[in-house]
Image (cartoon, rainbow, N blue to C red):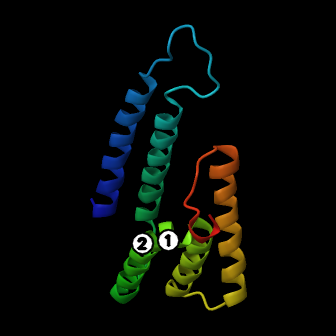
Amino acid sequence: MPPDRRLAVGLIAGSAAYLFGAFQIGAPEGQYAAVGPRLFPLVIGLGLLTSAVWIGVAATAEVRRSPVRWGAAASSALAFLAYIAALDVVGYLPATAAFLVLESRLLGSRVWVRDVIVSIAITVSVYGVFRLLLGLRLPAGLLG
């Protein structure tokens, strides 16, 4: 059996066991909640099961894999460390937008305008979800 197929079988078995455990989580007595304590474990288990099936299906196809570009991986890791260091100083909005533009460039994109627009859109939408919907504070930095 090819290694990818063995991995898929192992992940399917593991995700089935995880889902079985997730279904054993009970809701507290006498409480009503739209989102119960087992929602997130079920979503994670279904995501793991979907990924495992995907790996199993892809293992049957003949896939030509490109070699790993270690320079790009190292540059990406350094960019992430710089992002973490700059997050509190600069703030979430500018640091994240700049990080996403840099990452898209490191991963091979060569369209500046699209990279900037998409980075700003992603940054503002995540900010909106965390700050406005969930009420969580993100690092303000210079905007503070």
> In this rendering, does residue 68 appear at all?
no
Q: Picture coordinates of residue 114 (x, y %)?
A: 71, 82
Task: Classify mark 1: helix, strand or loop.
Answer: helix
Q: Picture coordinates of residue 40 (x, y %)?
A: 51, 37
Q: Picture coordinates of residue 46 (x, y %)?
A: 50, 41
124 lies left or right of 44: right
Q: Are the residues tagged 1 and 2 within 8 Å (C-beta)?
A: yes
Q: Residue at x 62, y 16 (%)?
A: 32
Q: Residues within 10 Å of mark 1 (few under 14, many from 20)?
A: some
> In this rendering, does residue 101 appear at all?
yes
Q: Is residue 131 above or below residue 34?
A: below
Q: Residue at x 72, y 78 (%)?
A: 117
In the rendered picture of this protein, how many numbered marks are placed on residues? 2
Q: Which mark is residue 89?
A: 1
Residue under label 2 = 85
Choose mark 1 or mark 2, whichever is in front. 1
Q: Give the quarter of the figure containing the N terminus.
A: bottom left
Tell me the amino acid under the disc marked 1.
Val
Q: Nearer the viewer, residue 65 or 98?
A: 98
Q: Which mark is residue 60?
A: none
Q: Residues within 10 Å of mark 2 (few under 14, many from 20)?
A: few
Tell me the amino acid under the disc marked 2.
Ala
Specify the quadrant of the image occupied by residue 90. Answer: bottom right
